[in-house]
Amino acid sequence: MAILLAPGGDYEAVRVAFDAGADAVYVGLKGWSRGGSRGELSWEELLDCQRLVASTRRELHLALNIIPKPAERARLFERIPPLLDIGIRTLIVNDIGILRCLRDRFPALRLTASIGCGAQTASDVTFFQQLGADAVVLPGTLRPEEIREIRRISGITIEVMIHMVEEFILLGKCWMPSYMHLKPSPLREGSVASGVPEGTDRGLRQTGSMKRGGVGACFKICQQPWEFYEKQRWIDTRSFPSRQISRVAEVSAYVAAGADILKLQGRSLSPEMLGPLVRRFRDSLDGRADLKNLERQPAALPVSWTVMGR
């Protein structure tokens, strides 16, 4: 049976996702993930979520959605042993170099090549497997027959982001926010639990990723209307294409094709919106859904929800 992996932007969202039927939840940690008030947990909140997971005998995955500069890697590596100590084993990584370094230095970790790594073919999956990935995330743009072909590769877990927003750029590799905000933000969240004295300035947020690092929240520049001019003469106003993909009616086809994990996008979703979304996929996975009506149901995402939310 495939595992249903749901997003969680805070403790309440994690709790709701589990109550709605998620087998596992992925979260972000401040300084390791995209900026913004939603979708990132403090160390103390991460501890609370891990306690919840331990009580339910399910699993918490941690998204490492940054591309750290060489000078930042030492700080990153110092944080891995405490994660292992509290029982977190799975990291979702979108930087190839960091993935390889983590595999060499921390063999106890279970490493997932994020959708931001761009894998879409059997050759891609083989490459990440050789690099040290235990799992790879594939986009929901791939059809079940393509997943079946990739599934012929043994020894690696296949995740499919079956509910996502397709962007005109490669997911997780956006540089557009650099036009708006480049100033890193300080991290001052020391505590006894985190091994850092209270109030200590732990340095700046990881800055290596324009979208997920110290540059603040995604400003969704790509979703703003763009003006087209020719020799100072206005031609047109257009928006870059993006579409929501929600394969809820095809869950059984993806499972039959060999998908091990069905992943849902949306760490910025409120618990009120996340719960029904997870429940729809849980019902479909368990064969309880009315398949004739699934595709006509709303996707449980606001119209404006596009780039923000992984």
Image: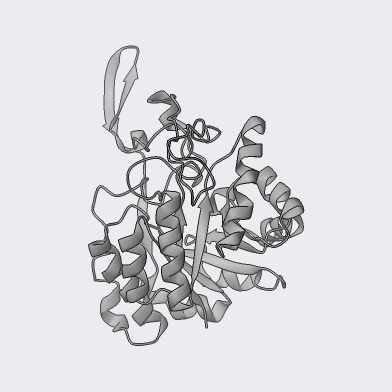
Left or right, residue 263 beside residue 101: left
Q: Which residue lies at the image location 40% right of the left edge and 69% below the top edge?
A: 247
Using the image, determine if residue 143 lies above or below residue 193.
Answer: below
Vertical placement of 29 versus 300: above or below? above
Along the horizontal axis of the image, is 112 left or right of 287?
right
Q: Residue 20's quadrant in the figure?
A: bottom left
Q: How many marks?
A: 0
- Lateral position of residue 192 relative to residue 94, left or right: left
Foreground pick, 218 / 232? 218
Q: Quadrant of residue 225?
A: top left
Taking the spot 41% from the left edge, 61% from the top edge, the residue there is 48
Residue 151 locus on image (x, y percent) = 64, 72
Q: Residue 86 appears at what percent x and percent y? A: 55, 62
Q: Work out whether residue 174 or residue 269 is closer to the camera in this orientation and state it.
A: 269
Q: Quadrant of residue 156?
A: bottom right
Q: Horizontal and vertical percent for residue 307?
A: 37, 45
Report the front residue among 289 and 65: 65
Q: Position of residue 298 (x, y in %)?
A: 23, 66
Residue 264 in view, yes or no: no
Q: Residue at x 58, y 77 (%)?
A: 258
In screen coordinates, is 112 left or right of 62?
right
Here the colouring is one colour
* Residue most extreme to the top: 231
Can residue 148 be seen at all in this image of the molecule? yes
Q: Residue at x 43, y 40 (%)?
A: 189
